[in-house]
């Protein structure tokens, strides 16, 4: 048995702003099948404190990055957790990263240094009987953990850093250095320094024992200037330590046969009953019941996701006979673009500017196409939910999208392997072609149905990927594969 501490700023169902939470929420159960025990270290946000059960204090601190704090162990949202209860840092309503003004909390550097320091201390024995062998750190919010391990007193625990999105690096002014409780050598050897600033992700990338990212293609891309966001040199230098492991989905939460958010449940043999879900969606979004394909988006509305391109193509899509529903919020320009499209195309385009977990399930279970035209996409989960639910993914050929969807070109249709529509480059003209190609494919019901069925049967579960993480942990700890049964 291997003991892992997963260090994350969000985890479904406790607190979620995106796919990171889906991953950190689902991976512990998937790893249990591979003799790995995971505890998740989370900040004591109100949502986490409110869900915490059987809590017991492991350790109390009088002054922890500016105020008193307690490490609590317990259960929350189906996870074994250790919570850093530090009200001066986390007892704030709403989004974990943003204040009510939609801007980053000004003390995010302190909030996530504290989280990382707590992980480091647990690695050094602060949680008593729970002594992790691996500190598995997610994204920049946990990026300082490996730096503490490397430059402060070493811990017995090994470190892994998983990059879910290299666009977010945690950049702060260098003046915070003295408050990070990081040994001065970390500054001298420029482990945390980045063009005169402090970069939390870079600190982790430089010092972790093992690096992973969330798909093989993204692992290649981030070593290039086009996708590396300035860290491509460092990642190329550490290429031997970097692997891509594709995310899976939590198939207890995401199963069209049991999903309670659906109007009608179904499986790959009863795909036609999705029609009832589609009708429920049309009513919800004020869309007419004409037979053309219903395209959908469930996403943060940002340029990463390429949705500004889709805004410019709505008129063409509707002219070709398509309809579109959008669930999401984000950049004002994109929001306004979709709101304008609703006005221009009543009955054909619908927009819900919000965040709605059950509605996201109904969309997967009722819409015909899930559009994910990202400029870059480390893995992406909505296309995986689309595959599982028979909502055919239409994706750009980047990152995890390239690794998980097989394009319906004629050869793939003929061979019976197509699962979606894939386009490149991530430019409006290519997205336009893909949208029109989807309309044409939808008009070939046999081909379409086969593609849906093929997607629904493809393995998007965590099984294979959890095994890869488990193997990586064992490799890091020097456990031979043959010894695994005897752990
Ligand atoms: P990212 O993490 O980059 O936002 P992913 O595709 O990995 O992209 O994960 C996004 C997750 O957030 C998915 O679970 C998706 O269903 C969910 N999601 C995004 N926007 C919304 C929304 N407006 N309402 C409900 N769920 C959403
Ligand atoms: C990030 C990425 C997304 C990925 C998710 C979970 O939010 O943008 O592509 O699926 O992390 O790994």
Image: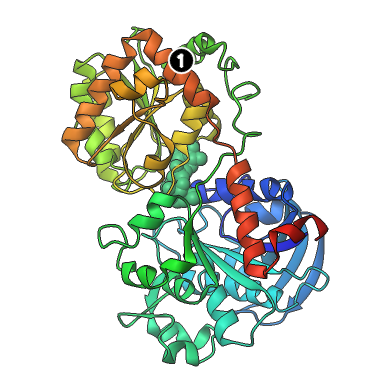
What residue is disc 1 on? 278
**Considering the numbered disc 1 on the image, is that residue within a helix, a strand or a loop?**
helix
Specify the farthest residue to the left: 429
Q: Is residue 84 left or right of residue 485?
A: left
Q: Quadrant of the N terminus?
A: bottom right
Q: Position of residue 421 (x, y in %)?
A: 33, 28
Where 314 falls versus 122 (above or below)? above
Asked if residue 269 lies left or right of residue 400, the reply is right
Estimate the x, y position of residue 102 in percent, counting from the top left.
40, 55
Coloring scheme of the render?
Answer: rainbow
Point 30% across, 80% down: residue: 195
The image shows a total of numbered marks equal to 1
Q: Residue at x 28, y 42 (%)?
A: 306
In the shown orientation, is residue 34 left or right of residue 317?
right
Specify few, some or many for label 1: CA neighbours under 10 Å numbering under 14, 14-19, or 20 or more: many
Split into 4 quadrants, where in the image is the C terminus? bottom right
Residue 383 in view of the camera:
yes
Above or below 412: residue 307? below
């Amino acid at each position: 048995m291997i003991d892992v501490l997963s260090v994350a700023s969000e985890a479904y169902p406790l607190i979620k702003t995106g796919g990171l939470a889906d991953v950190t929420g689902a991976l512990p159960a998937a790893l249990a099948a591979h003799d790995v025990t995971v505890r998740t270290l989370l900040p004591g946000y109100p949502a986490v404190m409110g869900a915490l059960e059987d809590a017991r204090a492991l350790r109390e601190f009088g002054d922890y990055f500016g105020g008193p704090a307690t490490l609590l162990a317990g259960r929350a949202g189906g996870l074994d957790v250790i919570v850093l209860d530090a009200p001066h840092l986390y007892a704030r309503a709403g989004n974990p990263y943003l204040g009510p003004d939609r801007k980053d909390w000004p003390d995010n550097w302190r909030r996530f240094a504290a989280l990382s320091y707590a992980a480091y201390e647990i690695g050094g024995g602060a949680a008593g009987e729970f002594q992790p062998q691996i500190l598995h750190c997610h994204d920049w919010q946990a990026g300082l953990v490996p730096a503490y391990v490397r430059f402060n007193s070493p811990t017995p625990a090994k470190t892994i850093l998983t990059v879910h999105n290299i666009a977010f690096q945690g950049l702060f002014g260098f003046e915070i250095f003295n408050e990070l409780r990081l040994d001065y050598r970390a500054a001298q050897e420029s482990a945390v320094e980045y063009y005169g600033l402090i970069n939390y992700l870079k600190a982790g990338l430089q010092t972790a024992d093992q690096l992973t990212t969330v798909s093989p293609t993204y692992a290649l891309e981030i070593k290039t200037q086009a996708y590396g966001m300035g860290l491509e040199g460092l990642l190329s230098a550490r290429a031997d330590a970097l692997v891509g492991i594709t995310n899976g989905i939590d198939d207890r939460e995401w199963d069209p046969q049991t999903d309670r958010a659906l109007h009608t449940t179904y499986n790959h043999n009863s795909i036609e009953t999705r029609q009832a879900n589609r009708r429920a969606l049309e009513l919800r979004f004020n869309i007419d019941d004409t037979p053309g394909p219903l395209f959908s988006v469930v996403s943060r509305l940002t340029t990463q996701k390429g949705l500004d391109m889709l805004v410019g193509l709505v008129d063409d899509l509707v002219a070709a006979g398509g309809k579109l529903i959008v669930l999401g919020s984000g950049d004002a320009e994109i929001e306004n673009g979709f709101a304008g499209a609703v006005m221009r195309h009543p009955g054909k385009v619908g927009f819900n500017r919000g965040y709605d977990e059950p509605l996201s399930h109904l969309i997967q279970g009722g819409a015909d196409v899930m559009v994910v035209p990202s400029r870059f996409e480390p893995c992406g989960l909505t296309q995986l939910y689309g595959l599982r639910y028979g909502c055919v993914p239409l994706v750009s050929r980047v990152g995890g999208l390239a690794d998980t969807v097989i394009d319906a070109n004629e050869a793939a249709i003929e061979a019976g392997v197509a699962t979606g529509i894939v386009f490149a480059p991530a430019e409006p003209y290519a997205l336009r072609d893909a949208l029109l190609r989807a309309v044409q494919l939808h008009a070939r019901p046999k081909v379409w149905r086969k593609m849906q069925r093929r997607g629904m049967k493809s393995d998007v579960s965590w099984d294979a990927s959890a095994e890869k993480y488990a193997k990586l942990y064992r490799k890091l700890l020097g456990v031979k594969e043959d010894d695994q049964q005897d752990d």
